Image: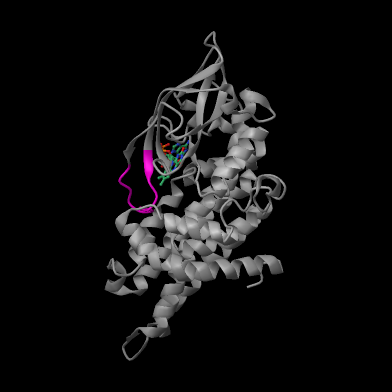
Amino acid sequence: MNTGLTPDQLKLQAQVRELAAGPVAKRAAEVDRTEQYPWDNVELLKDAKLLGMTIPTQYGGQGKNWLDAVLTIEALSAACSVTGRIAVETNMGAISAVMAYGSEEQKKMAADMVLAGDKPAICITEPEAGSDANGMTTRADKKGNRYVLNGRKHWITGGGVSRLHLIFAKVYDEKGTFEGIGGFLAIRDETKGLKITKREPTMGLRGIPEAVIDFEDMDVPPSSLVIPPRGLKKGFADLMNAYNSQRVGAATVALGIAEGAYQLALDWSEKRQQFGRPINEFQGLQWKLADMSIKLSAAQALVYNAARSGEGGFPDMLLAAQAKVFTSESAIQVVNDALQFFGARGYSRELPLERMARDVRMFTIGGGTAEVLRNVVAGALLKKKLPQTRDGWGKASE
Ligand SMILES: Cc1cc2nc3c(=O)[nH]c(=O)nc-3n(C[C@H](O)[C@H](O)[C@H](O)COP(=O)(O)OP(=O)(O)OC[C@H]3O[C@@H](n4cnc5c(N)ncnc54)[C@H](O)[C@@H]3O)c2cc1C
C-alpha cells in the first residue's frame, strides 16, 4: 500500500520492524506474565535511537516528526504493546509538552532524562476527576518562594518506574486565590512528598505499572512550574494541546496490536486445514479478513493523517480525536476477529492473541474515552463548546 512515506521513513520502518520481530517479540509474553517493566527493551530502544527521537537536536534528540514516531510505535506494538507504549511516552505527551513550553532548564533536564531511558509520567486523572479533568482537587499553594502540592492521582502510567513526573494541579496564590491549572515537574525519589501508594491490578498492558500517586506536602520551587506562553490561566488548554500527540500515539499502539493480530490470523488461515482445505477457503473467513484489512487501512490513514497534521506543532485536536476513536474501536474488533481464527488455540495463553485482546481493550478508555472524544469531535464540527466536554481546551474554571 502506498502510504506516502519518504525513503527515510521506509528505512526507519524496516529497521524498527526488524527489532520488533526479533528481541522485542521474544520477550513480549514474559513481560506480560511477570508484569515486569522491560528495562532491557528500553536499552534496545535507546541504542536504536528510538527514545526521545522527537526531541529537538539542540537538546540531544533527533528532531524527528510525529509520523516518524508513529511508524516506530506501530511496528513495536505489533510485537509488544508495552514497548510500543514506552515509545509513545518517551516521544509524546509529557515530554512533548515540556519541549514545547518548558524553560531552557526544564527542557534540558527532561531531554537528558528521557534520552538516558526515563519514561516520563503524566499525572492528570484523579479518583473523582477522570473525564472531567477540571474537577481535579490536587492543589498547589504558593507559600513564600515555594509551591506546596497536596492531592491524589490514580491510573498514572509508569508510576513506580518513571522518574520525571508532570503533575497537574490547581494553583492558588498566597492569598488563596485560584490562578489556573498548572503543570509541575517533579522527580520520584528526589522530590519529597511524591509517593507511589498502589499499583493497579490491570487487565492487560501488564508490563507497565499503573499507579496511585499521593502528594503529601510536596514542596517544589516555582521553577518547576511549566508555564506555556498564554500563562497560567489559559495554560492548561495549551498543555492539553500537547496531549493530542499522546492521543495519536495511543491510537498507534492500538493499530499496531491489531496489525500484529491480523497478520497472525492471515498466516494461520493458510496453515490450518479443516474439511480438507485451508480455512481461508471458507467465504465466512475471507470476508472477515477483508473487513479486518479495511478497518486497518482506514485506521492507519486516520492515524498517519493526524500525525502529519502536527508538523511544526501538535496534531490537530479533531483529527487526533477522530483517529483515536476509530482506531481504538476497530482494533478491538480486529483483534477479537483474529482470535476467532484460531478456534480454541486463540483462547490459550500459549498464543499471543488473548494477551493482545486484553491489551487492546484499554485504548477506548485511557487518554480520553471514546465517548468523551466523540464530544470533542462533535464540538469541533459544531464549533461549539458543548456543556458535556472537558473544559480543558477553554477556560480553567474553579
Ligand atoms: C491503562 C490506563 C492508563 C492510564 N494512564 C493515565 C496516565 O498516565 N495519566 C493520567 O492522568 N490518566 C491516565 N489514565 C486515566 C484515563 O485518562 C481515564 O481513565 C479516562 O480519562 C477516563 O476517566 P475515568 O476512568 O475516571 O472514567 P469516567 O470519567 O468516570 O467515565 C466513566 C464513563 O462515563 C463516560 N463519560 C464521562 N463523561 C462523559 C461525557 N461527558 N459524555 C459521554 N460519556 C461520558 C466515559 O466515557 C466512561 O464510559 C489511564 C487509564 C488507563 C485505563
Quarter of the image for residue 338 reads bottom left
Farthest bottom residue in view: 276
Quarter of the render that holds ligand 1: top left
Q: Residue at x 43, y 79 (%)?
A: 267
What secondary structure predominates along the stretch shown in magenta? loop
Q: Is residue 346 magenta?
A: no
Count of all numbered marks drawn on residues in the image: 0
- Quadrant including the N terminus: bottom right
Instruction: Write down the region rendered in magenta.
Output: 200-211
Residue 48 as seen in the image, left or right of residue 258: right
Residue 195 as seen in the image, left or right of residue 257: left
Residue 250, given in percent of the width and then of the height, sits at 51, 51
**Coloring basis for residues:** one colour
Residue 142, given in percent of the width and then of the height, sits at 53, 15
Residue 321 shows in the view: no
- Would you place residue 265 above or below residue 393 in this image? below
Q: Residue at x 59, y 30 (%)?
A: 236
Residue 90, given in percent of the width and then of the height, sits at 54, 49
Residue 276 shows in the view: yes
Q: Residue at x 54, y 20 (%)?
A: 171
Q: Is residue 207 magenta?
A: yes
Residue 252, given in percent of the width and then of the height, sits at 53, 57
Residue 224 as seen in the image, left or right of residue 287: right
Observer-nearest residue: 230 or 146?
146
- Would you place residue 107 above or below residue 56 in this image? above
Farthest top residue in view: 175
Observer-nearest residue: 282 or 48?
48
- Would you place residue 101 above or below residue 291 in this image? above
